[in-house]
Image: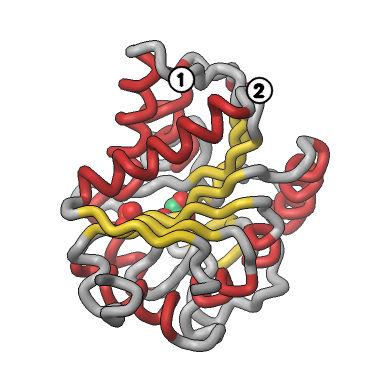
Amino acid sequence: MTFPHTLRIAETAAEAGEMAAAMLAEAIAARPSIVLGLATGGTMRGVYASLLARQTRGEVDLTQICAFNLDDYLGLGIEDEQSYATEMRRVLFAPAGIDPRRCHIPNGRAADPAKEGDRYEAAIRDAGGIDLQLLGLGVNGHIGFNEPGSLPQSRTRVVDLAPQTIVHNRKHFPPGADVPTRAISMGIATILEARRILVLATGAVKADAVSAMLERPPSTDCPASFLSRHGQVSVVLDRAAAARIGPVRAP
Ligand code: F6R
Protein backbone atom coordinates (compact mmCIF):
# COMPACT_ATOMS: atom_id res chain seq x y z
CA MET A 1 0.00 0.00 0.00
CA THR A 2 1.59 3.30 -1.01
CA PHE A 3 -1.19 5.61 0.15
CA PRO A 4 -1.73 6.14 2.94
CA HIS A 5 1.66 5.35 4.42
CA THR A 6 -0.10 3.97 7.52
CA LEU A 7 -3.81 3.28 8.13
CA ARG A 8 -5.11 2.57 11.63
CA ILE A 9 -8.72 1.75 12.40
CA ALA A 10 -10.03 2.07 15.95
CA GLU A 11 -13.30 0.65 17.19
CA THR A 12 -14.66 3.98 18.45
CA ALA A 13 -14.20 7.68 17.78
CA ALA A 14 -12.76 8.13 21.27
CA GLU A 15 -10.13 5.45 20.61
CA ALA A 16 -9.28 7.00 17.24
CA GLY A 17 -8.77 10.37 18.96
CA GLU A 18 -6.46 8.71 21.49
CA MET A 19 -4.47 7.08 18.68
CA ALA A 20 -4.02 10.41 16.92
CA ALA A 21 -3.04 12.11 20.19
CA ALA A 22 -0.48 9.37 20.89
CA MET A 23 1.07 9.90 17.44
CA LEU A 24 1.24 13.66 18.02
CA ALA A 25 2.68 13.21 21.52
CA GLU A 26 5.39 10.96 20.15
CA ALA A 27 6.31 13.54 17.50
CA ILE A 28 6.37 16.33 20.11
CA ALA A 29 8.54 14.25 22.46
CA ALA A 30 11.00 13.69 19.60
CA ARG A 31 11.10 17.41 18.82
CA PRO A 32 9.62 19.68 21.52
CA SER A 33 9.78 22.78 19.29
CA ILE A 34 7.99 20.97 16.45
CA VAL A 35 5.97 23.08 13.99
CA LEU A 36 2.47 21.59 13.96
CA GLY A 37 -0.32 22.34 11.52
CA LEU A 38 -3.58 22.08 13.48
CA ALA A 39 -7.28 21.77 12.71
CA THR A 40 -10.44 22.73 14.57
CA GLY A 41 -13.84 21.03 14.65
CA GLY A 42 -15.63 18.34 16.58
CA THR A 43 -13.25 15.54 15.57
CA MET A 44 -10.26 17.32 17.12
CA ARG A 45 -11.75 18.07 20.54
CA GLY A 46 -10.90 14.58 21.89
CA VAL A 47 -7.38 14.81 20.46
CA TYR A 48 -6.67 18.09 22.21
CA ALA A 49 -8.27 16.88 25.46
CA SER A 50 -6.03 13.80 25.32
CA LEU A 51 -2.91 15.91 24.66
CA LEU A 52 -3.77 18.10 27.67
CA ALA A 53 -4.29 15.01 29.85
CA ARG A 54 -0.92 13.65 28.70
CA GLN A 55 0.71 16.96 29.62
CA THR A 56 -0.94 16.88 33.08
CA ARG A 57 0.44 13.35 33.58
CA GLY A 58 3.91 14.62 32.65
CA GLU A 59 4.09 12.52 29.49
CA VAL A 60 4.48 15.42 27.04
CA ASP A 61 5.37 19.11 27.15
CA LEU A 62 3.23 21.15 24.78
CA THR A 63 4.64 24.54 25.75
CA GLN A 64 7.41 24.69 23.15
CA ILE A 65 5.41 23.72 20.07
CA CYS A 66 4.73 26.22 17.30
CA ALA A 67 1.23 25.93 15.81
CA PHE A 68 -0.24 27.01 12.49
CA ASN A 69 -3.97 26.45 12.20
CA LEU A 70 -5.53 25.64 8.89
CA ASP A 71 -8.26 28.22 8.72
CA ASP A 72 -10.68 30.69 10.28
CA TYR A 73 -13.93 32.27 9.22
CA LEU A 74 -13.72 35.51 7.26
CA GLY A 75 -14.92 38.36 9.46
CA LEU A 76 -14.26 36.54 12.76
CA GLY A 77 -11.17 36.86 14.92
CA ILE A 78 -9.85 36.28 18.42
CA GLU A 79 -12.47 38.78 19.75
CA ASP A 80 -15.32 36.57 18.48
CA GLU A 81 -16.71 33.63 20.43
CA GLN A 82 -17.33 31.47 17.31
CA SER A 83 -13.96 32.05 15.63
CA TYR A 84 -11.52 29.19 15.32
CA ALA A 85 -8.93 31.46 16.97
CA THR A 86 -11.11 31.56 20.10
CA GLU A 87 -11.87 27.84 19.88
CA MET A 88 -8.17 26.94 19.70
CA ARG A 89 -7.32 29.24 22.60
CA ARG A 90 -10.08 27.58 24.68
CA VAL A 91 -9.49 23.92 23.84
CA LEU A 92 -5.69 23.83 23.59
CA PHE A 93 -3.48 26.89 23.59
CA ALA A 94 -4.49 28.52 26.91
CA PRO A 95 -4.88 25.35 29.01
CA ALA A 96 -1.60 23.98 27.59
CA GLY A 97 0.20 27.22 28.47
CA ILE A 98 1.52 27.87 24.97
CA ASP A 99 2.78 31.42 24.41
CA PRO A 100 0.26 33.10 22.04
CA ARG A 101 3.21 34.26 19.91
CA ARG A 102 3.75 30.60 18.97
CA CYS A 103 0.08 30.10 18.01
CA HIS A 104 -0.74 31.19 14.47
CA ILE A 105 -4.07 31.23 12.66
CA PRO A 106 -5.21 33.11 9.56
CA ASN A 107 -6.71 36.41 10.70
CA GLY A 108 -10.33 36.45 9.60
CA ARG A 109 -10.47 40.12 10.53
CA ALA A 110 -7.39 41.15 8.54
CA ALA A 111 -7.73 44.69 7.17
CA ASP A 112 -6.91 43.36 3.70
CA PRO A 113 -8.06 39.71 3.53
CA ALA A 114 -6.61 39.32 0.03
CA LYS A 115 -3.12 39.91 1.47
CA GLU A 116 -3.61 37.74 4.59
CA GLY A 117 -2.86 34.56 2.66
CA ASP A 118 0.57 35.81 1.57
CA ARG A 119 1.37 36.97 5.10
CA TYR A 120 0.41 33.56 6.48
CA GLU A 121 2.43 31.63 3.90
CA ALA A 122 5.46 33.79 4.73
CA ALA A 123 4.99 33.12 8.47
CA ILE A 124 4.95 29.35 7.82
CA ARG A 125 8.11 29.64 5.71
CA ASP A 126 9.83 31.80 8.38
CA ALA A 127 9.08 29.09 10.96
CA GLY A 128 10.88 26.56 8.75
CA GLY A 129 7.76 24.90 7.33
CA ILE A 130 5.27 22.55 8.95
CA ASP A 131 6.72 19.33 10.37
CA LEU A 132 3.42 17.56 10.98
CA GLN A 133 0.00 18.63 9.71
CA LEU A 134 -3.11 17.34 11.49
CA LEU A 135 -6.20 17.23 9.26
CA GLY A 136 -9.88 16.52 9.74
CA LEU A 137 -12.05 15.58 6.79
CA GLY A 138 -15.18 17.37 5.65
CA VAL A 139 -18.29 15.37 4.79
CA ASN A 140 -17.68 16.53 1.20
CA GLY A 141 -13.99 15.59 1.24
CA HIS A 142 -12.66 19.05 2.09
CA ILE A 143 -9.36 19.49 3.94
CA GLY A 144 -8.95 22.81 5.70
CA PHE A 145 -11.65 24.77 3.93
CA ASN A 146 -10.51 23.61 0.50
CA GLU A 147 -13.93 22.72 -0.81
CA PRO A 148 -14.61 20.56 -3.89
CA GLY A 149 -13.28 22.43 -6.91
CA SER A 150 -10.14 23.59 -5.06
CA LEU A 151 -6.98 23.14 -7.08
CA PRO A 152 -3.95 21.15 -5.90
CA GLN A 153 -1.77 24.23 -6.44
CA SER A 154 -3.98 26.41 -4.21
CA ARG A 155 -2.37 28.51 -1.47
CA THR A 156 -3.71 30.28 1.64
CA ARG A 157 -6.56 32.49 0.42
CA VAL A 158 -10.14 33.62 0.90
CA VAL A 159 -12.55 30.80 0.02
CA ASP A 160 -16.31 30.37 -0.30
CA LEU A 161 -17.71 27.62 1.92
CA ALA A 162 -19.79 24.90 0.27
CA PRO A 163 -23.50 24.89 1.22
CA GLN A 164 -23.00 21.46 2.86
CA THR A 165 -20.19 22.86 5.04
CA ILE A 166 -22.32 25.80 6.15
CA VAL A 167 -25.09 23.40 7.19
CA HIS A 168 -22.58 21.10 8.99
CA ASN A 169 -21.06 24.03 10.91
CA ARG A 170 -24.39 25.58 11.92
CA LYS A 171 -24.46 23.49 15.11
CA HIS A 172 -21.47 25.43 16.47
CA PHE A 173 -23.39 28.74 16.28
CA PRO A 174 -26.27 29.93 18.50
CA PRO A 175 -29.76 29.42 17.04
CA GLY A 176 -30.63 32.20 14.62
CA ALA A 177 -27.02 33.46 14.30
CA ASP A 178 -25.58 34.05 10.84
CA VAL A 179 -23.15 31.27 9.91
CA PRO A 180 -20.17 32.65 7.94
CA THR A 181 -20.11 31.75 4.26
CA ARG A 182 -16.45 32.56 3.63
CA ALA A 183 -13.16 31.67 5.30
CA ILE A 184 -9.39 32.07 4.94
CA SER A 185 -7.81 28.66 4.49
CA MET A 186 -4.40 27.19 3.84
CA GLY A 187 -4.38 25.83 0.30
CA ILE A 188 -3.88 22.26 -0.84
CA ALA A 189 -0.33 23.06 -1.99
CA THR A 190 0.38 24.58 1.44
CA ILE A 191 -0.86 21.40 3.13
CA LEU A 192 1.11 19.14 0.79
CA GLU A 193 4.34 20.96 1.75
CA ALA A 194 4.08 19.68 5.34
CA ARG A 195 6.75 17.04 6.00
CA ARG A 196 4.20 14.61 7.47
CA ILE A 197 0.40 14.54 7.46
CA LEU A 198 -2.00 12.89 9.92
CA VAL A 199 -5.66 12.63 8.90
CA LEU A 200 -8.30 11.80 11.51
CA ALA A 201 -11.90 11.03 10.47
CA THR A 202 -14.63 9.48 12.59
CA GLY A 203 -18.31 8.67 12.27
CA ALA A 204 -20.52 7.20 9.57
CA VAL A 205 -21.11 10.68 8.16
CA LYS A 206 -17.47 10.66 6.92
CA ALA A 207 -17.53 7.17 5.34
CA ASP A 208 -18.13 8.36 1.75
CA ALA A 209 -15.45 11.05 1.98
CA VAL A 210 -12.97 8.52 3.40
CA SER A 211 -13.66 6.14 0.54
CA ALA A 212 -13.21 8.93 -2.05
CA MET A 213 -9.96 10.07 -0.37
CA LEU A 214 -8.43 6.58 -0.31
CA GLU A 215 -9.89 4.81 -3.29
CA ARG A 216 -10.59 7.28 -6.08
CA PRO A 217 -8.01 8.92 -8.34
CA PRO A 218 -6.98 12.44 -7.28
CA SER A 219 -9.68 14.87 -8.34
CA THR A 220 -11.01 18.28 -7.40
CA ASP A 221 -14.30 16.49 -6.57
CA CYS A 222 -12.64 15.29 -3.35
CA PRO A 223 -9.82 17.66 -2.29
CA ALA A 224 -8.53 15.10 0.26
CA SER A 225 -7.77 12.74 -2.64
CA PHE A 226 -4.76 14.97 -3.48
CA LEU A 227 -3.12 13.71 -0.30
CA SER A 228 -2.17 10.60 -2.30
CA ARG A 229 0.53 12.80 -3.91
CA HIS A 230 2.29 13.05 -0.51
CA GLY A 231 4.62 10.29 0.64
CA GLN A 232 4.14 10.49 4.41
CA VAL A 233 0.43 10.38 5.22
CA SER A 234 -1.02 8.52 8.20
CA VAL A 235 -4.78 8.02 8.39
CA VAL A 236 -6.64 7.19 11.60
CA LEU A 237 -10.31 6.18 11.37
CA ASP A 238 -12.95 4.66 13.55
CA ARG A 239 -14.87 1.63 12.35
CA ALA A 240 -17.86 3.77 11.23
CA ALA A 241 -15.74 6.07 9.05
CA ALA A 242 -13.97 3.02 7.55
CA ALA A 243 -17.26 1.30 6.65
CA ARG A 244 -17.08 1.99 2.89
CA ILE A 245 -13.44 1.19 2.18
CA GLY A 246 -12.44 -2.12 0.67
CA PRO A 247 -11.48 -5.21 2.71
CA VAL A 248 -7.80 -5.03 1.68
CA ARG A 249 -7.48 -1.66 3.37
CA ALA A 250 -9.88 -2.30 6.25
CA PRO A 251 -9.50 -5.93 7.30
C1 F6R B 1 -11.19 22.81 10.56
C2 F6R B 1 -11.06 22.29 9.22
C3 F6R B 1 -12.06 21.35 8.63
C4 F6R B 1 -12.50 20.26 9.60
C5 F6R B 1 -13.56 19.39 8.93
C6 F6R B 1 -14.12 18.35 9.89
O1 F6R B 1 -10.09 23.62 10.90
O2 F6R B 1 -10.15 22.66 8.58
O3 F6R B 1 -11.51 20.78 7.47
O4 F6R B 1 -11.40 19.48 9.98
O5 F6R B 1 -14.62 20.18 8.47
O6 F6R B 1 -14.85 19.01 10.89
P1 F6R B 1 -15.51 18.18 12.09
O7 F6R B 1 -14.41 17.59 12.86
O8 F6R B 1 -16.28 19.21 12.88
O9 F6R B 1 -16.40 17.17 11.46
Residue 170 shows which numbered tag?
Answer: none
Residue 60 shows which numbered tag?
Answer: 1
SS of the residue at dot 2?
helix
Residue 101 shows which numbered tag?
Answer: 2
Instruction: Choose mark 2 or mark 1, whichever is in front.
Output: 1
Quadrant in the rendering for residue 2: bottom right
SS of the residue at dot 1?
loop
- Disc on the earlier residue, 2 or 1: 1
| Residue plotted at (34% across, 38% down) | 47
User: Do the CB atoms of the residues marked 2 and 1 lie less than 8 Å apart?
Assistant: no
Image: 40 above or below 242: above
Q: Nearer the viewer, residue 243 or 160?
A: 243
Q: What amino acid does circle 2 point to?
A: Arg
Q: Position of residue 77 (x, y in %)?
A: 52, 38
Q: Nearer the viewer, residue 236 or 180?
A: 236
User: What separation in Å lies between label 2 and label 1 (alpha carbons)?
Assistant: 20 Å
Tell me the crowding category of disc 2: few under 14, some 14 to 19, or many 20 or more residues within 10 angstroms, Cα based: few
| Residue plotted at (61% across, 40% down) | 68
Image: 58 above or below 218: above
Query: Seen in the image, is 153 located left or right of residue 68?
Result: right
Q: Is label 2's Cβ within 8 Å of ligand 1?
A: no
Query: Seen in the image, is 77 located left or right of residue 180?
Result: right
Q: Position of residue 164 (x, y in %)?
A: 33, 73
Image: 78 above or below 250: above
Tell me the crowding category of disc 1: few under 14, some 14 to 19, or many 20 or more residues within 10 angstroms, Cα based: many
Q: What amino acid does circle 1 point to?
A: Val
| Residue plotted at (38% across, 55% down) | 200
Q: Position of residue 81 (x, y in %)?
A: 37, 35
| Residue plotted at (78% across, 53% down) | 118
